[in-house]
Image (cartoon, rainbow, N blue to C red):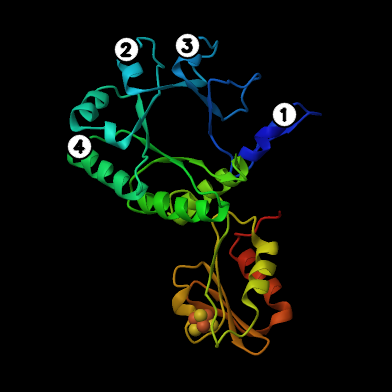
Amino acid sequence: MEDLASTGHLYDAVTDKWTMTDQAAEFLYMGTSPLPYMAPAGTRQLLDVSTWLGHDDHFYCVPVFTIAEWRNVETRHTVMNVVRCSANELSDAVLHELAEDATVVLMISSNEASFYTTMRACGDRMLSAHVHMPVILEYHSSEASLENGILDASTDVGGLLVEGLGDAVMLTLRSDDQIDSATSVRTAFGILQAARTRMTKTEYISCPSCGRTLFDLQETTSMIRSHTDHLKGVKIGIMGCIVNGPGEMADADYGYVGSGPDRITLYRGQEIVKRNVPSAHAVQELIGIIRDDERWVER
Ligand code: SF4
């Protein structure tokens, strides 16, 4: 049960209750090893069909088929059947065959060198064939470095989501040759947020900093985060100077912009709300503006 904390499900042994964080996975791919207890409410297990057939729960557990198994196994879930395949298996004929079953959700992966290009071509094939099944993008990083894995996943999977290709993400990142579930889930939610597919946390837009920057950008960003990172869906721009900052944070809800030595100008959208506030008080003033807009919640 403690292991599920890495997927955003927290178990309290005293009350025998689960709580889900804002970034909890709704589906847990368990393959051939179902959870030995009831899954947390709001969560479903994906089980390989051979395991699913022998499981008691045929509703909250969802089967995962290969294309051949989907053709040959007669027992199916009444609502959702996941067909796991590689993009290259999905010819027009196969797509049309699968599309006849309204319960099919595709889980598509690619072993090709360019995940993005292969999946993009697959998305184009689906669109031209007028096939609109839900798609889970399955991405496994082969990078030894966790940081490179995060970057690759963000560009490959994020690029597809930005173009409207894909409805869900199954992401596997590794650190020290082990699957890193916590980072995989956190990164998946980060990608969904960056692609504007699903907002689960505060968003920060900061400039890269340059010779005009009027404060320590990293230190200030982490200080603002420490006060505001529980405000789901709020976008805060943190910009080093007032010359270019307001333009660079164009779609932020609030702006914290350096306007002179030790002076900060605060914005609501593109409108200046407080000018030249001493930096020692600027975060509290920013919180005040968020409160005035009734977007503040206690942590
Ligand atoms: S917003 Fe100002 S400080 Fe930041 S990178 Fe742009 S010009 Fe430099």
Tag in front: 3 or 4: 3
Q: Residue 284 in the image: state x and y as whole percent.
A: 71, 72
Which x, y percent locates residue 83? 37, 26
Distance CA(mark 3)–CA(mark 2): 13 Å
Amino acid carrying label 1: it is Lys
Q: Earlier in the sequence, mark 3 or mark 4?
A: 3
- Indicate the amino acid at tag 4: His
- Which is more toward the observer, 25 or 68? 68
Rate crowding at label 4 as few (under 14), some (14 to 19) or many (20 or more) other CA atoms within 10 Å.
few
Give how far apart the Cα atoms at labels 2 and 1 are: 40 Å
Element at badge 2? helix
Numbered disc 4: secondary structure: loop
Pick the residue in front: 129 or 197.
Answer: 129
Q: Are marks 1 and 4 in contact (CB under 8 Å)?
A: no
Relative vertical location of residue 103 with respect to residue 189 in this rendering, above or below? above
Circle 4 is placed at which residue position?
130
Q: Is residue 256 above or below residue 76?
A: below
| Residue labelled 2 has its Cβ within 8 Å of some atom of ligand 1 | no
- Sequence order check: which comes first, mark 1 or mark 3? 1
Residue 72 image label? 2
Q: Are marks 3 and 4 in contact (CB under 8 Å)?
A: no
Q: Is residue 187 above or below residue 79?
A: below
State the residue position of label 1. Answer: 17
**Dot 2 amino acid type:** Asn
Q: Residue furthest right?
A: 14
Q: Secondary structure at mark 3?
A: helix
Type of amino acid at the residue the image marks with label 3:
Leu
